[in-house]
Each structure stands twice: as structure tokens, then as C-alpha cells.
Image: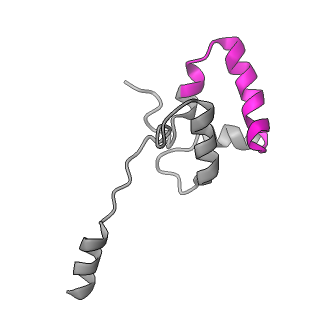
Amino acid sequence: MNKYRFYKYNIEFCLQQLNVIAYAAAIRAIPKELGISANTFHNYRKLLLTSKSDIPYITIRRLENIFKLERGGLENFVLEFKDLTALLKESQA
């Protein structure tokens, strides 16, 4: 069972893949690189799926680059939206 499945983003999972020394260094280096406080980074790591809070898009993209992930690689959820055709059909009904 994935203990990180309740988090909105897989940041903590990526960090846990590091050894202890690299983990400690990353916890200090990443917030500096992103220009945020260590506390904000901690809050980002622990965002729950049900949380209304979110991380700015550019920060997510930068984290994906830091962890060498593809776009969307940190997301632990799927967004489902109707496409434009469906929206137009609904608006005409």
C-alpha cells in the first residue's frame, strides 16, 4: 500500500528515494532554489488530496525539473474535465 496516496503531489515520495544525506541536503536546497521558506516547502510536501490549497503551477514545474520528472509526474490525482464540444452542446441545450 502506498503511504503517499493521500498526498496531492508525490514530492515526499521523490524525497524518500534519496539516501539520508541527500534527503537532508535536498530539504535545505530545494526551498532556496524555489525562493520559498522551509516551512512552505514542508506544507507543499504534506498537501492532502482533499485540501483546497494548491501549489503554484510554475513551482510544480520547477519541482518536476528538479526531480527529473515529466510534466505531470508529481501529480497524485487525475483532473477530469469536459472537452469544448461537450460544453458547447450543454450550453445549446
Q: Identify the image quadrant of residue 18.
A: top right
Please say if 28 is above or below 8: above
Picture quadrant of residue 61: top right
Q: Is residue 38 visible?
A: no
Q: Is residue 29 left or right of residue 23?
A: right
Q: Is residue 13 visible?
A: yes
Q: How is the image coloured?
A: one colour
Question: Looking at the rendering, in which quadrant would you find the C terminus?
Answer: bottom left
Vertical order, 60 against 87 (above or below): above
In the rendered image, the residue lying farthest to the bottom is 92
Name the residue nearer the viewer: 60 or 6: 60
Q: Is residue 37 above or below residue 66?
A: below
Please state the horizontal and vertical placement of residue 23, each as a whole percent of the image: 67, 20
Query: Which segment did they paint magenta?
Result: 14-38
The residue lying at 30 percent from left, 66 percent from top is 83
Residue beneath the point at 66% across and 42% down: 43
Is residue 53 one of those drawn in magenta?
Answer: no
How many dots with numbers? 0
Left/right placement of residue 55 relative to residue 78 reads: right
Q: Nearer the viewer, residue 86 or 48?
A: 86
Please name the residue shown 47% across and 31% down the image. Answer: 4
Determine the residue positioned at 55% across, 18% down.
17
> What main secondary structure does the magenta stretch of the protein show?
helix
Location of residue 21 with respect to 34 vertically, above or below? above
Quadrant where the N terminus is found in the figure: top left
Locate residue 24, reporting x and y percent.
Answer: 73, 20
Task: State yes or no: residue 25 in magenta.
Answer: yes
